[in-house]
Amino acid sequence: MDFATDRETESLREEVRAFVRDHLSSGVRERVSSTGDYHDQQFHRALAERGWVGAHWSVEEGGRGWDRNKTDVIYEELASAGAPTEGSAITQIVGEAIRRVGTAEQRERLLAPICRGEVLLALGYTEPGSGSDLASVRTRASRDGEGWTIDGQKIFTTLGNRADYVFLLARTDPAAPKHTGLTTFLVPTASEGFSVAPIFTLSGQRTNVTYYSDVRVGDEARVGEVGQGWEIVNVALAFERGGEFAAQLRRLVNAAVAWGQDEELGGEARFLIRIGRAVASAEVSRLLGVQASWSRTGARAGAVEGAMAKVYGTEALIRESRALLDATGVQGVRNRGVAGAAAGGELQHLYRESQIATIYGGTSEVLLTAIAQQRLGLPRGRRRPTPQRERSGELEQ
Ligand SMILES: Cc1cc2nc3c(=O)[nH]c(=O)nc-3n(C[C@H](O)[C@H](O)[C@H](O)COP(=O)(O)OP(=O)(O)OC[C@H]3O[C@@H](n4cnc5c(N)ncnc54)[C@H](O)[C@@H]3O)c2cc1C
């Protein structure tokens, strides 16, 4: 594995930086902060026009047939600039599942429009009672003639308010063991019986509760075989976890350095040590991300490298943002737009944003368990008392 970057990659970085200067306007930033959606359709369409959505997909699929590393470079640069790429990222995660297990009709209908920025997808896995224990989802899809009727509720369906389809994990066989009775669907958000309500996180980001009340879909909405949902979701999850947090760490460092320059802290050893630690964390996080990306190019998509990159990057983000925010004293707690806010409020915004990063896409505790078992070969641990297990009395059995 070669970690070095070549001239072509560096020139792509420059191209992305120029794109950011041209397209990440104050209008885009204002729309993102006023809605809380980390997606802007105009910006997304501009990305797609450049061929930067699904760029590593084949030309027949609508992509450019690029090396996966190039796509990583594009999204790393966009994330470092704080560009709203959640819609592009989530859509491509689902796209990876469609490429692998979708029917020819689904690939034809969806992949090229995704690359053109015309179709947006959301992930509908988590339910109020099923997050880490995802295989226990209760949203039900029942056979209904040629199609299916869906009933249930999902929580944290990020961009469910903007997406054209929700990639939904549903129970199709309640009598089967929990991992085998699941199937995935692409549910059109225009369906009768679909509704959505917002939830806002600590940093003002919008995610959603989505409701499915007698939603009728045809069998063409099914992705993969009936009962194969667990395996399919795990393919998609392997693409969800990676090194994107290195870019957020870089953003953090840039904001802290800007503040330090304003305050003329160039000679302050205590401040420089904090910066140095954050720079080192960003670099380790980047390298783990490169390794995760490389692991996906082989047959082992779903290996633990993505989990390792995600745990390290998100834990580092919490640690370093706290340390750097502390360094800024009272100026640091001022919000974006408030006079005198350290680094224009960017540091405290990143600090607030970091608090949820160890939760979405799999919590640190759960991912560490997976690493311990799958990489280190450790035995399954004793089950920890979660609030749900205590309430259900499972622990007393
Ligand atoms: C901002 C945000 C965006 C999200 N976006 C999406 C999305 O687009 N689509 C989607 O489907 N989901 C999304 N999620 C959901 C996310 O994946 C879940 O929140 C996450 O998997 C945790 O599930 P939970 O919230 O039910 O917590 P729980 O599973 O109830 O966990 C509670 C606590 O118990 C710990 N715990 C649970 N089980 C174990 C165990 N076996 N061993 C040790 N500790 C354990 C956890 O680590 C955690 O600290 C999002 C979440 C957030 C916060």
Image: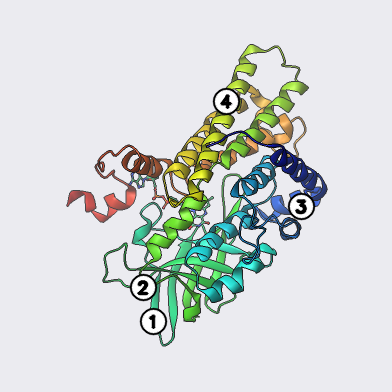
> In the rendering, at what x and y percent does residue 107 appear?
56, 70
Instruction: Give the amino acid at mark 1.
Output: Arg
**Residue 287, x across and y down, in percent:** 55, 34
Residues tagged 1 and 2 counted as in contact (Cβ below 8 A)? yes
* 94 left or right, relative to 301: right
C-alpha separation, residue under disc 1 versus residue under disc 4 = 53 Å
**Residue 5 visible in the picture:** yes
**Number of numbered discs on residues:** 4
* Residue 395 on image: x %, y %: 22, 49
Mark 3 vs 1, N-terminal side? 3
| Lower sequence index among marks 2 and 4 | 2
Question: Which residue is identified by label 2?
Answer: 172
User: In the rendered image of this protein, does residue 276 appear above or below residue 17?
Assistant: above
The residue wearing badge 4 is: 280
Q: Nearer the viewer, mark 4 or mark 3?
A: 4
**Residue 210 appearing in the image:** no
**Furthest residue in direction bottom, as rendered:** 145
- Circle 3 SS class: helix
The response on whether ligand 1 sits within 8 Å of label 2 is: no
* Closer-to-camera residue (246/316): 246
Tell whether 90 sits left or right of 340.
left
Q: The disc labelled 2 sits on which kind of residue?
A: Thr
Residue at mark 1: 143
Dot 3 corresponds to which residue? 28
How far is disc 2 from disc 3 in space, using C-alphas? 41 Å
Question: Marks 3 and 1, how far apart in space?
Answer: 43 Å
Q: Amino acid at mark 4?
A: Ala
Among the two numbered marks 1 and 2 on one chain, the one whose residue lies closer to the N terminus: 1
